[in-house]
Every structure is written in C-alpha cells, then in structure tokens.
Image: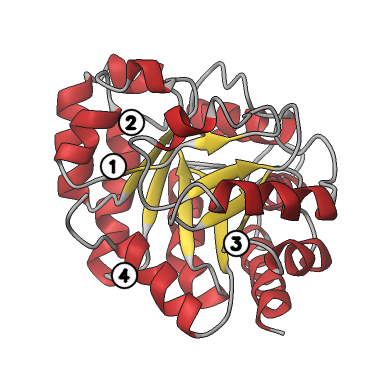
Amino acid sequence: MTHISRIDRRFSVLKEHGRAALVTFITAGDPDFDTSRAILMGLPEAGADIIELGMPFSDPMADGPAIQASSQRALKAGQTMRRTLDLVAEFRKSHSDTPVILMGYYNPIYVYPTEKFLDEATDAGVDGLIVVDVPPEADEEVCLPAVQRGLNFIRLATPTTDDKRLPAVLANTSGFVYYVSITGITGAAAPDIADVHSQVQRIKAATTLPVAVGFGVRTGEQAKAISKGADGVVVGSAIVTAIAESLDSDGQATGKTVSSVLNLVNGLAEALAD
C-alpha cells in the first residue's frame, strides 16, 4: 500500500511514545444495537487505540464460546451487515482518528456481495479487514480488492505458521500482523509469554509491519507482559464476557453493561501505560 492509513499512523505515534497498542474487540450489535453503539463510542476515551468490530456470523468456527455467544446475541437482536456498516459510519462522525477494523468470516461478505461490501465499508470509514477463513491462496477473492480500495488487510499468523509458510501470510498483509498466541479457539487458554515473545521476534525478522498479539489475553498483567515484546495486544473474549456477565436473566442490557466494558478497557489501558 502506498498511502498511510489510520492504522499506520496510530502505530507510529505509539512507537514514538514507547507503548504498545491496546486493540479491543467487540461484536457489532451485542447485546443490541444501541448498547453496542454506546460501547463503541466510549472505547477511545476508555483507552482503546484500535477497535476490532466483529461482523456477527452464525458459525464463527475460530471463536470460543464467549465470542460465539456474542454473535448469537447480536443476530438475535437483529444485527445485519448493513447495520454494522452504519455503526462504523456513525462512529466515524465523532471519532476521526481511531482505526476501526472489521473482523469475521467470508460468508457474510460474499453474500453481501463482496464488491458492494468493500465499497460501502470504505465509504463508512472502515480502515481494515481481518477475514479469518480466507487463505493467501485466495487473495483475489477479497484481499486484493480491499487493498485496491485503500483498506488494510490484516492476516493472522499462528504458532503453526512455520518459516516456509510465513512469506505467503505476509505477502499482501498491511497495517499489522495479528499473531495468534495459542493453538485453538479464542479465549481457550492463557498464552506462554516467553514463547509469544520468541514467535513475535521470528515474525518481525521477516517484516517491517507491527505485530499485535491476541487470543487468550484477559488481564492487565498479561497484556503488560506481552507488550514487552509486541507492538500491540488484542483483547476480545474478556470484553465480550464482561458484556455477557452484565446482562439480566433475559439476556438484556442493564445499567451496568456499558460501564463494565469501559472500566475493563480502562484498566487494560492503564496497565499498558505503566
């Protein structure tokens, strides 16, 4: 990519300050559109540097129970791809600097269909995409058309991405590389910090892109430890769990839902700033 994106600028500024990025994940429309909007609008002030917004899908195969449940709540509340893009457009009216990445699976993009989705995502103010089930061998499906529109396409590297596979993963990746710190689904286990740092260094030897680490990061202490060897820390399952635990017996938002999430994010941000 030839232009400097919001994601590039954010990592550059944070590097100048000697701090890793806090990347937060929520599912669009979880537990309902209005509550999701309130959480999204509050994330930058709470300390989120980059926001991953999940595109709800009925079969999120790489996600653990917490994020699967968040997708189900959102879909039950009527969330659609159109409403997800509307959410970004509304956010962008009052937040011009915070990068927003749409994360999810190819099926909802394909049926939108792809070209229309990419055009409307760009118009809404989306900065990047993470599409977990499209491999590099299918870059012409969504990756390259996204890049042509100025969107960052962020690829995942995992503990099983060996040196032979890594160049293919990095080939059309931009913005940052997302290192999956554990083998398995999101939120399934705690990462081994020393191993994570070793793997991040291996990836950084092959690219100039920042490397952010996610999957299994739940506490400020973990985030701080990981940040010592990474450019960013991604927290998702812990945030959507905070949403779930704040709901009433009918699964509806309560007066604690928004504040519980923003307080958690604020604590994570403070840990990274120490």
Look at the picture and state if 5 lies above or below 64: below
Q: Nearer the viewer, residue 250 or 45?
A: 45
- Disc 1 crowd rating (10 Å Cα; few below 14, some 14-19, many 20+) is many
Separation of marks 1 and 4 at Cα, in angstroms: 15 Å
Q: Is residue 88 left or right of residue 150?
A: right
First along the sequence among labels 3 and 2: 2
Q: Tell me where residue 188 appears, x and y as whole percent.
A: 81, 34
Give the residue at x 57% y 64%.
Answer: 231
What residue sits right under mark 3 in the picture? 258
Separation of marks 4 and 3 at Cα, in angstroms: 18 Å
What residue sits right under mark 2 in the picture? 81
Marks 4, 3: nearer the viewer = 4
What residue sits right under mark 1 in the picture? 85
Q: Nearer the viewer, residue 49 or 157?
A: 157
- Total number of numbered discs in the rendering: 4
What residue sits right under mark 4 in the picture? 95
Separation of marks 2 and 1 at Cα, in angstroms: 6 Å
